[in-house]
Amino acid sequence: MKAAWSLTRADERMLDTLQRQAFDYFPTYTHPRTGLVADTSRPGAPASIAVVGFALSAYPVGVERGWIGRDEAVGHCLDVLRFFAGSDQSGAVDATGWRGFYFHFLNSETGLRAWASELSSIDTALLIMGMLTAAAYFDAATPAETELRKLANTLYERVNWNWSEHDDDAVALGWKPECGFLNYGWQGYSEAIVLYALGLGAASHRLTAASFEAWTVTYQWENIYGIDFLYAGPLFMHQFSHAWIDFRGIRDRFMHEKDCDYFENSRRAVQVQRQYAIRNPRGFSGYGQDCWGLSAGDGPSVEPKVVAGRRQAFYGYAARGVPWGPDDGTLNGACMVASLVFAPEIALPALRKLVAEASPGARAVHASGVNATAGGEMAWISEGEFGLDQGLMVLMIENFRSGLLWRLTRSIPCLRAGLLRAGFTGGWL
């Protein structure tokens, strides 16, 4: 008897279609001059530097899958690397960045700060991770690929990681020219593990080992539904860093003490999400063993309604999580897809159901949010597509199918050095 997660030919076709559709977001929503990629497909959306990082990582997948030619993919990567190399790093209110970091949102046409956004430590890290991934893949001795690698390494070394470590070893979430550092640093387990790995691996201006320890002492180990795991409510926190870093079998001090690793922890987080949906304590429509996935994403902004005898508000864009919320009945398809690498026996049946059950099935997977409670007769589905969702799907489906991104990043010396400085041992290290 086949295991519940054994792939059929229909599954392979489904994954290929979903991955290709997600990949197509990047060439479609890339500015032809700056190479910046729109945060969402909605008209007028600014560029997101994190989405650019996902795009740079998705192009190797596209080449391997035959969806884009190698030279064209290199051209897209070079466009945006050249832009960042020559960008305004003055830190002014209308600049592109400062000290090697970049503002979270940029005007796609000009490349200057948009929406009065913050200079973002995590989004810069996701951007840099994409640059280094592209550099690891495009390894030919051609002038274009040689330039790509040189630019990626230069831009990585330009980041003053240590500057962001401003208050008792805590790394700041961000900085604004109007007010300086934001009033809080990284606390509690999250997607920031890739930020620490890159910051610790730099040849100069690196984070201190104390910064990583200062972060891990804020971790929250919980037992929920009989499952022991390192808590973070939204699923994306258990997934973003894993899109690039293979955490199977490598452990830092914290995970050694818990006899666990971050990959296994993410598998447990998926189990917790599923158990929460089965219990459905707030009585939302559609939740169940094959319908789960609370994460950051778009949601309905509609009038409150009565749900299970209480007045339920709806939150618009929010980071939803379990079991303590926030939760307004909105699920995210991308985090379900990304769970394939951790718990295929759970994620694959859920994905089959989502794609097959409703006529807008594929749209529901690519949408940032789906809410069966708010939508009345028809489920509410987020308008357009969000680049972070598409990038996460491209990378995690590929890691599930071939492990390509994990193989590439294991060869990046600075990433390896950063993990070792953070105290990771074992496995591929």
Image (cartoon, grey):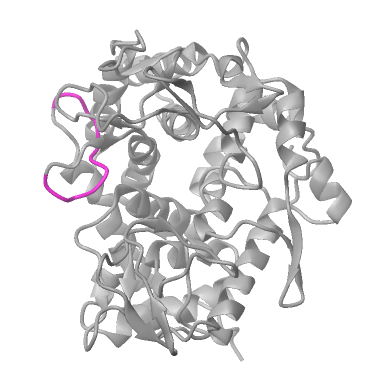
Picture quarter containing residue 78? top left
**Would residue 201 be seen by someone viewing this image from the given angle?**
no
Residue shown at the point (44%, 89%) measured from the top left: 308
**Would residue 216 be seen by someone viewing this image from the given angle?**
yes
Residue shown at the point (31%, 12%) measured from the top left: 92
Picture quarter containing residue 83? top left
Quarter of the image with the N terminus in it: bottom right
Quarter of the image with the C terminus in it: top right
The residue stretch that appears in magenta = 33-43
| Residue 42 falls within the magenta-colored stretch | yes
Percent position (x, y) of residue 404? 50, 47
Percent position (x, y) of residue 133? 46, 33
Percent position (x, y) of residue 101? 44, 20
Percent position (x, y) of residue 60? 37, 40
Q: Main secondary structure of the magenta part?
A: loop
Viewer-proximal residue among 408 and 298: 298
| Residue 211 falls within the magenta-colored stretch | no
Residue 238 versus residue 57 in the image, above or below: below
> How many labels, in total?
0
